[in-house]
Amino acid sequence: MSGPAPATIVSRPDKKHILLVEDDASLGKALGASLQRAGFEVSVATDFRVALDVLEASRPVDVLVTDLVMPASVNGIALSRMARMRNSNIKILYMTGYDIPGVAQQALGPILKKPIDASVLVSEVERALTTTQVAPFATQ
């Protein structure tokens, strides 16, 4: 079983598509709603399998916001690398409530500390959309 389907609003080409991966369903729902209110199309996934399904869908993801620590064998770093292999232009943000030594050197984008205020997340997503990120693992 791959978990619940992502909650996605109707696709509009002019809206930036954000994939929010958070294993805490209530937190994911709240943060996703805040991003929707800010004008983004949002897909929320509670595990990496659902996130991969969204990444494979026809509507490209502009920004991946993922928890670093998830209750499965695939963490946020591994998920972000899979996402970058599928889409070299995807912007990546991480969230974590833990202090994980050495993770910053592996990250493909900024790491946000949880608990995170929804307005801070919206600002960071907007910043990511206007910032160039290094694109290792890109397919050519």
Image (cartoon, grey):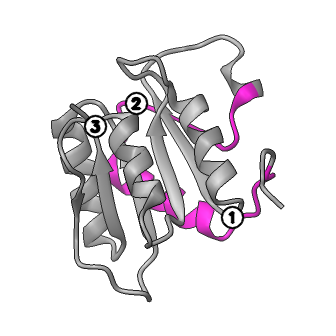
Question: What is the span of residues highlighted in magenta in the rendered image?
Answer: 106-135
As shown in the figure, which amino acid type bears the numbered disc 3? Thr
Q: Classify residue 42 by image quadrant.
A: bottom left
Q: Which class describes the residues within 10 Å of circle 1: few (<14), some (14-19), or many (20+)?
A: some
Q: Nearer the viewer, residue 135 or 53?
A: 53
Does residue 100 appear to the left or right of 73 in the view shown? right
Identify the element where label 1 is drawn.
loop
Which residue position holds label 2?
114
Identify the element where label 3 is drawn.
loop
The percent position of residue 57, horizontal first and vertical second, equals: 42, 64
Q: Classify residue 18 by image quadrant.
A: bottom left
Toward the front, the furthest residue is: 1
As shown in the figure, which amino acid type bears the numbered disc 2? Lys
Does residue 28 appear to the left or right of 21 in the view shown? left
Discs 1/2, front: 1
Is residue 54 highlighted in magenta?
no
Does residue 21 appear to the left or right of 62 in the view shown? left
The CA distance from mark 3 to mark 1 is 23 Å
Q: Nearer the viewer, residue 106 or 11?
A: 11
Query: If you read the primary sequence from the N terminus, does the residue marked by circle 3 or circle 2 appear first?
Result: 3
Query: If you read the primary sequence from the N terminus, does the residue marked by circle 3 or circle 1 appear first?
Result: 3
Q: Nearer the viewer, residue 51 or 9?
A: 51
Which residue position holds label 3?
46
